[in-house]
Image (cartoon, rainbow, N blue to C red):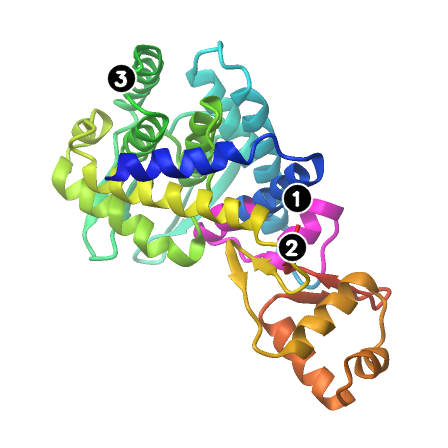
Amino acid sequence: MSMDKIQDIMARWTALQPLSDRDREMLSRRFTIDFNYNSNHIEGNTLTYGQTEILLLFGKIIGEAEVKDVQEMTASNLGLKMMTEESRLKDVPMTQNFIRIFHKTLLREDYTVYLNLPGGQSTSYVIHAGQYKTRPNSVITRYGDRFEYASPEETPALMTDLVDWYNEAELSGKYTPIELAAIFHYRYIRIHPFEDGNGRIARLMVNYILSRHGYPMIVVRSRKKNEYLEALHKTDLTVGSEPSLGAHASKRGIQQFLTYFTNLFIEEVTYNIRFLTERGDNVWWFDGERVNFRSDSTNKILNLMFAIPDITIQKLSDEVGINVAAVNKQLKQLTTKGYVQRVDKDGTWRLIITPSV
Protein backbone atom coordinates (compact mmCIF):
# COMPACT_ATOMS: atom_id res chain seq x y z
CA MET A 1 0.00 0.00 0.00
CA SER A 2 2.78 2.45 0.92
CA MET A 3 4.59 1.65 -2.33
CA ASP A 4 1.41 2.43 -4.29
CA LYS A 5 1.10 5.76 -2.45
CA ILE A 6 4.72 6.64 -3.22
CA GLN A 7 4.26 5.79 -6.90
CA ASP A 8 1.09 7.90 -6.97
CA ILE A 9 2.64 10.94 -5.28
CA MET A 10 5.77 10.72 -7.47
CA ALA A 11 3.58 10.51 -10.59
CA ARG A 12 1.78 13.69 -9.47
CA TRP A 13 5.12 15.36 -8.76
CA THR A 14 6.59 14.32 -12.12
CA ALA A 15 3.50 15.61 -13.93
CA LEU A 16 4.34 19.13 -12.67
CA GLN A 17 7.81 19.03 -14.24
CA PRO A 18 9.50 20.99 -15.59
CA LEU A 19 8.78 23.78 -13.14
CA SER A 20 8.92 27.37 -14.29
CA ASP A 21 11.93 29.36 -13.11
CA ARG A 22 9.71 31.33 -10.72
CA ASP A 23 8.06 28.25 -9.23
CA ARG A 24 11.44 26.53 -8.79
CA GLU A 25 12.86 29.60 -7.08
CA MET A 26 9.86 29.99 -4.75
CA LEU A 27 9.91 26.31 -3.79
CA SER A 28 13.69 26.34 -3.28
CA ARG A 29 13.48 29.41 -1.07
CA ARG A 30 10.70 27.91 1.03
CA PHE A 31 12.58 24.64 1.43
CA THR A 32 15.77 26.45 2.44
CA ILE A 33 13.99 28.30 5.26
CA ASP A 34 11.89 25.33 6.35
CA PHE A 35 14.74 22.82 6.41
CA ASN A 36 17.25 25.00 8.24
CA TYR A 37 14.74 26.31 10.77
CA ASN A 38 13.29 22.90 11.62
CA SER A 39 16.48 20.82 11.63
CA ASN A 40 18.16 23.28 13.99
CA HIS A 41 15.07 23.94 16.09
CA ILE A 42 14.84 20.21 16.83
CA GLU A 43 18.31 20.51 18.40
CA GLY A 44 17.45 23.57 20.50
CA ASN A 45 18.26 26.54 18.25
CA THR A 46 16.19 29.51 19.48
CA LEU A 47 15.93 31.62 16.31
CA THR A 48 12.31 32.11 15.28
CA TYR A 49 11.04 31.14 11.84
CA GLY A 50 10.99 34.82 10.89
CA GLN A 51 14.50 35.48 12.18
CA THR A 52 15.71 32.45 10.21
CA GLU A 53 14.13 33.71 7.00
CA ILE A 54 15.54 37.23 7.29
CA LEU A 55 18.98 35.91 8.25
CA LEU A 56 19.23 33.45 5.37
CA LEU A 57 17.68 35.66 2.70
CA PHE A 58 19.12 39.03 3.68
CA GLY A 59 21.96 38.33 6.11
CA LYS A 60 20.31 40.44 8.80
CA ILE A 61 19.24 39.79 12.39
CA ILE A 62 15.91 41.18 13.58
CA GLY A 63 15.36 41.32 17.33
CA GLU A 64 17.45 39.57 19.98
CA ALA A 65 19.40 36.43 19.11
CA GLU A 66 22.22 34.33 20.54
CA VAL A 67 25.44 34.62 18.52
CA LYS A 68 25.87 30.83 18.62
CA ASP A 69 22.39 30.29 17.16
CA VAL A 70 23.05 32.75 14.34
CA GLN A 71 26.38 31.10 13.49
CA GLU A 72 24.81 27.66 13.68
CA MET A 73 21.98 28.61 11.32
CA THR A 74 24.34 30.23 8.83
CA ALA A 75 26.59 27.15 8.85
CA SER A 76 23.56 24.91 8.43
CA ASN A 77 22.56 26.76 5.28
CA LEU A 78 26.10 26.44 3.93
CA GLY A 79 25.91 22.70 4.61
CA LEU A 80 22.59 22.48 2.76
CA LYS A 81 24.06 24.25 -0.28
CA MET A 82 27.09 21.98 -0.19
CA MET A 83 24.91 18.87 0.08
CA THR A 84 22.73 20.00 -2.84
CA GLU A 85 25.79 20.50 -5.05
CA GLU A 86 27.30 17.14 -4.06
CA SER A 87 24.02 15.30 -4.72
CA ARG A 88 24.25 16.30 -8.39
CA LEU A 89 27.49 14.29 -8.75
CA LYS A 90 25.60 11.05 -9.22
CA ASP A 91 28.60 9.05 -10.45
CA VAL A 92 30.71 9.92 -7.39
CA PRO A 93 30.26 7.40 -4.55
CA MET A 94 29.62 8.44 -0.98
CA THR A 95 32.74 8.68 1.19
CA GLN A 96 33.46 9.08 4.89
CA ASN A 97 35.55 12.13 4.05
CA PHE A 98 32.47 13.76 2.54
CA ILE A 99 30.53 13.18 5.79
CA ARG A 100 33.40 14.54 7.89
CA ILE A 101 33.61 17.67 5.72
CA PHE A 102 29.87 18.09 6.19
CA HIS A 103 30.40 17.93 9.94
CA LYS A 104 33.24 20.44 9.86
CA THR A 105 31.02 22.80 7.84
CA LEU A 106 28.22 22.57 10.40
CA LEU A 107 30.39 22.93 13.53
CA ARG A 108 32.75 25.49 11.92
CA GLU A 109 35.57 25.01 14.47
CA ASP A 110 36.67 23.06 17.53
CA TYR A 111 35.11 24.17 20.80
CA THR A 112 35.37 23.28 24.48
CA VAL A 113 32.53 21.91 26.60
CA TYR A 114 32.65 22.60 30.34
CA LEU A 115 30.82 20.34 32.80
CA ASN A 116 30.12 20.63 36.51
CA LEU A 117 30.58 17.33 38.35
CA PRO A 118 29.02 16.20 41.64
CA GLY A 119 30.97 17.52 44.63
CA GLY A 120 31.69 20.90 43.09
CA GLN A 121 34.38 19.69 40.70
CA SER A 122 34.43 20.61 37.03
CA THR A 123 35.85 19.10 33.85
CA SER A 124 36.10 20.00 30.20
CA TYR A 125 36.70 18.38 26.84
CA VAL A 126 37.16 19.54 23.25
CA ILE A 127 34.73 18.71 20.45
CA HIS A 128 36.66 18.48 17.19
CA ALA A 129 34.89 19.62 14.02
CA GLY A 130 35.11 17.01 11.27
CA GLN A 131 36.56 14.27 13.50
CA TYR A 132 34.89 11.19 14.89
CA LYS A 133 34.19 11.12 18.61
CA THR A 134 36.88 10.41 21.15
CA ARG A 135 34.49 9.97 24.09
CA PRO A 136 31.52 7.61 24.52
CA ASN A 137 28.15 9.24 23.86
CA SER A 138 24.67 8.29 24.96
CA VAL A 139 21.22 9.79 25.39
CA ILE A 140 18.61 9.69 28.13
CA THR A 141 15.41 8.68 26.37
CA ARG A 142 12.03 10.26 27.07
CA TYR A 143 11.34 7.17 29.21
CA GLY A 144 14.30 7.88 31.47
CA ASP A 145 16.66 5.08 30.42
CA ARG A 146 20.18 5.61 29.08
CA PHE A 147 20.79 4.52 25.50
CA GLU A 148 24.39 3.97 24.42
CA TYR A 149 25.67 4.63 20.92
CA ALA A 150 28.72 2.99 19.32
CA SER A 151 31.97 3.40 21.24
CA PRO A 152 34.76 5.61 19.87
CA GLU A 153 36.78 2.44 19.23
CA GLU A 154 33.97 0.86 17.16
CA THR A 155 33.03 3.98 15.23
CA PRO A 156 35.59 4.04 12.36
CA ALA A 157 34.89 0.42 11.39
CA LEU A 158 31.12 0.85 11.67
CA MET A 159 31.23 4.00 9.52
CA THR A 160 33.28 2.09 6.94
CA ASP A 161 30.61 -0.62 6.95
CA LEU A 162 27.83 1.97 6.59
CA VAL A 163 29.37 3.82 3.65
CA ASP A 164 30.41 0.58 1.91
CA TRP A 165 26.89 -0.81 2.40
CA TYR A 166 25.33 2.33 0.96
CA ASN A 167 27.50 2.39 -2.17
CA GLU A 168 26.92 -1.31 -2.83
CA ALA A 169 23.18 -1.08 -2.13
CA GLU A 170 22.81 1.92 -4.42
CA LEU A 171 24.56 0.14 -7.26
CA SER A 172 22.56 -3.06 -6.78
CA GLY A 173 19.19 -1.35 -7.13
CA LYS A 174 17.87 -3.59 -4.36
CA TYR A 175 16.28 -0.71 -2.45
CA THR A 176 14.13 2.25 -3.39
CA PRO A 177 15.59 5.72 -2.67
CA ILE A 178 13.23 6.04 0.31
CA GLU A 179 14.40 2.71 1.73
CA LEU A 180 18.04 3.67 1.19
CA ALA A 181 17.54 7.00 2.97
CA ALA A 182 15.61 5.48 5.90
CA ILE A 183 18.07 2.63 6.48
CA PHE A 184 21.04 4.99 6.23
CA HIS A 185 19.46 7.45 8.68
CA TYR A 186 18.68 4.77 11.24
CA ARG A 187 22.09 3.08 11.04
CA TYR A 188 23.90 6.42 11.19
CA ILE A 189 21.98 7.56 14.27
CA ARG A 190 22.77 4.27 16.03
CA ILE A 191 26.48 4.88 15.42
CA HIS A 192 26.34 8.58 16.36
CA PRO A 193 29.88 9.04 15.01
CA PHE A 194 30.42 12.62 16.17
CA GLU A 195 30.16 14.17 19.60
CA ASP A 196 27.76 16.84 18.35
CA GLY A 197 25.67 17.51 15.24
CA ASN A 198 24.64 13.93 14.46
CA GLY A 199 20.93 14.64 14.03
CA ARG A 200 21.56 17.55 11.69
CA ILE A 201 24.00 15.45 9.63
CA ALA A 202 21.50 12.56 9.44
CA ARG A 203 18.74 14.84 8.12
CA LEU A 204 21.11 16.36 5.55
CA MET A 205 22.25 12.91 4.41
CA VAL A 206 18.66 11.78 3.96
CA ASN A 207 18.13 14.62 1.49
CA TYR A 208 21.48 13.94 -0.16
CA ILE A 209 20.29 10.39 -0.89
CA LEU A 210 16.81 11.43 -2.07
CA SER A 211 18.21 14.19 -4.29
CA ARG A 212 20.81 11.86 -5.84
CA HIS A 213 17.90 9.79 -7.13
CA GLY A 214 15.79 12.67 -8.39
CA TYR A 215 13.37 12.63 -5.46
CA PRO A 216 12.17 15.83 -3.75
CA MET A 217 13.93 16.72 -0.50
CA ILE A 218 11.97 16.70 2.75
CA VAL A 219 11.74 18.44 6.12
CA VAL A 220 11.37 16.81 9.54
CA ARG A 221 9.15 19.44 11.20
CA SER A 222 10.12 20.39 14.74
CA ARG A 223 6.45 20.57 15.75
CA LYS A 224 6.36 16.81 15.00
CA LYS A 225 9.62 16.06 16.79
CA ASN A 226 7.99 13.55 19.14
CA GLU A 227 6.70 11.45 16.22
CA TYR A 228 10.22 11.37 14.78
CA LEU A 229 11.86 10.37 18.07
CA GLU A 230 9.13 7.85 18.89
CA ALA A 231 9.62 6.11 15.52
CA LEU A 232 13.34 5.82 16.24
CA HIS A 233 12.71 4.59 19.80
CA LYS A 234 10.22 1.90 18.74
CA THR A 235 12.65 0.71 16.11
CA ASP A 236 15.43 0.55 18.72
CA LEU A 237 13.27 -1.82 20.77
CA THR A 238 12.86 -4.11 17.76
CA VAL A 239 16.49 -4.00 16.61
CA GLY A 240 18.06 -4.28 20.08
CA SER A 241 20.25 -2.01 22.19
CA GLU A 242 23.65 -3.35 21.10
CA PRO A 243 25.23 -0.60 18.93
CA SER A 244 26.54 -3.06 16.33
CA LEU A 245 23.00 -4.40 15.83
CA GLY A 246 21.73 -0.89 15.14
CA ALA A 247 24.65 -0.10 12.85
CA HIS A 248 23.81 -3.12 10.69
CA ALA A 249 20.02 -3.06 11.02
CA SER A 250 18.09 -4.61 8.14
CA LYS A 251 15.18 -3.18 6.19
CA ARG A 252 12.89 -5.64 7.98
CA GLY A 253 14.31 -4.65 11.36
CA ILE A 254 13.63 -0.95 10.88
CA GLN A 255 10.10 -1.41 9.52
CA GLN A 256 8.56 0.99 12.05
CA PHE A 257 10.97 3.78 11.17
CA LEU A 258 10.59 3.01 7.47
CA THR A 259 6.80 3.34 7.79
CA TYR A 260 7.21 6.67 9.58
CA PHE A 261 9.72 7.87 6.97
CA THR A 262 7.53 6.81 4.04
CA ASN A 263 4.54 8.68 5.46
CA LEU A 264 6.74 11.73 6.09
CA PHE A 265 7.92 11.68 2.47
CA ILE A 266 4.34 11.47 1.19
CA GLU A 267 3.27 14.37 3.47
CA GLU A 268 6.15 16.58 2.39
CA VAL A 269 5.75 15.96 -1.35
CA THR A 270 2.00 16.50 -1.01
CA TYR A 271 2.79 19.88 0.58
CA ASN A 272 5.13 20.74 -2.32
CA ILE A 273 2.42 19.88 -4.83
CA ARG A 274 -0.19 21.94 -2.98
CA PHE A 275 2.25 24.85 -2.67
CA LEU A 276 2.70 24.86 -6.45
CA THR A 277 -0.92 24.29 -7.47
CA GLU A 278 -3.18 26.01 -4.93
CA ARG A 279 -3.09 29.62 -6.05
CA GLY A 280 -4.98 32.79 -5.29
CA ASP A 281 -4.87 36.11 -3.46
CA ASN A 282 -6.00 34.52 -0.20
CA VAL A 283 -3.74 31.45 -0.27
CA TRP A 284 -1.02 31.60 2.41
CA TRP A 285 1.67 29.15 3.58
CA PHE A 286 3.72 28.91 6.76
CA ASP A 287 6.21 26.21 7.80
CA GLY A 288 4.75 23.44 5.67
CA GLU A 289 1.08 24.21 6.17
CA ARG A 290 -1.61 26.22 4.42
CA VAL A 291 -3.01 28.94 6.67
CA ASN A 292 -6.67 29.92 6.32
CA PHE A 293 -8.02 33.11 7.86
CA ARG A 294 -11.67 33.37 8.86
CA SER A 295 -11.68 37.14 8.49
CA ASP A 296 -11.51 38.62 5.00
CA SER A 297 -9.98 41.74 6.53
CA THR A 298 -6.91 39.70 7.55
CA ASN A 299 -6.37 38.64 3.95
CA LYS A 300 -6.72 42.27 2.84
CA ILE A 301 -4.19 43.45 5.44
CA LEU A 302 -1.66 40.82 4.39
CA ASN A 303 -2.08 41.53 0.68
CA LEU A 304 -1.64 45.27 1.29
CA MET A 305 1.48 44.69 3.42
CA PHE A 306 2.89 42.42 0.71
CA ALA A 307 2.27 45.05 -1.98
CA ILE A 308 3.27 48.08 0.13
CA PRO A 309 5.83 47.08 2.83
CA ASP A 310 5.96 50.61 4.30
CA ILE A 311 2.19 51.01 4.53
CA THR A 312 1.01 52.86 7.65
CA ILE A 313 -1.54 51.57 10.12
CA GLN A 314 -3.83 54.48 9.23
CA LYS A 315 -3.61 53.58 5.54
CA LEU A 316 -4.40 49.93 6.37
CA SER A 317 -7.44 51.13 8.30
CA ASP A 318 -8.61 53.27 5.37
CA GLU A 319 -8.06 50.59 2.73
CA VAL A 320 -9.54 47.66 4.67
CA GLY A 321 -12.44 49.66 6.10
CA ILE A 322 -11.94 48.87 9.78
CA ASN A 323 -10.85 51.18 12.59
CA VAL A 324 -7.26 51.59 13.75
CA ALA A 325 -7.86 49.62 16.96
CA ALA A 326 -9.10 46.64 14.92
CA VAL A 327 -6.06 46.87 12.64
CA ASN A 328 -3.72 46.92 15.64
CA LYS A 329 -5.48 43.90 17.14
CA GLN A 330 -5.02 41.91 13.94
CA LEU A 331 -1.40 43.01 13.58
CA LYS A 332 -0.69 41.88 17.12
CA GLN A 333 -2.19 38.45 16.38
CA LEU A 334 -0.26 38.13 13.11
CA THR A 335 2.99 39.16 14.82
CA THR A 336 2.46 36.77 17.74
CA LYS A 337 1.90 33.90 15.30
CA GLY A 338 5.12 34.85 13.52
CA TYR A 339 3.34 35.58 10.24
CA VAL A 340 4.60 39.17 9.96
CA GLN A 341 7.52 41.07 11.43
CA ARG A 342 8.29 44.76 11.72
CA VAL A 343 11.70 45.80 10.48
CA ASP A 344 12.97 48.05 13.28
CA LYS A 345 15.14 50.52 11.38
CA ASP A 346 12.75 51.73 8.70
CA GLY A 347 9.41 50.58 10.09
CA THR A 348 8.52 48.49 7.04
CA TRP A 349 6.63 45.21 7.30
CA ARG A 350 8.17 41.90 6.37
CA LEU A 351 5.75 39.10 5.53
CA ILE A 352 7.06 35.82 6.91
CA ILE A 353 3.95 33.99 5.85
CA THR A 354 4.26 33.14 2.15
CA PRO A 355 1.69 34.18 -0.46
CA SER A 356 0.60 31.89 -3.26
CA VAL A 357 3.11 31.35 -6.05
> Mark 3: which amino acid?
Lys
**118 left or right, relative to 110:** left
Decide: is 58 above or below 83. Answer: below
Residue hosting label 3:
174
The answer to whether residue 240 of the structure is visible from this angle is: no
Q: Residue at x 57, y 58 (%)?
A: 286
The alpha-carbon separation of the residues under discs 2 and 1 comes to 10 Å
In the displayed image of the protein, which residue is found farthest to the front?
15
Decide: is 198 above or below 123. Answer: above
Image coordinates for residue 2, horizontal then vertical, percent: 27, 39
The answer to which of 126 and 218 lies nearer the viewer is 218
**256 left or right, relative to 288:** left
**1 left or right, relative to 289:** left
**Residue 56 within the segment the image draws in magenta:** yes
Residue hosting label 2:
356
Count of numbered marks: 3
Image coordinates for residue 126, horizontal then vertical, percent: 46, 35
User: In this picture, which residue range is highlighted in magenta?
Assistant: 36-62
Residue hosting label 1:
26
Q: Residue at x 47, y 54 (%)?
A: 44
> Mark 2: which amino acid?
Ser
SS for tag 1?
A: helix
Q: The N terminus lies in which quarter of the figure? A: top left
> Mark 1: which amino acid?
Met
Tag in front: 2 or 1: 2
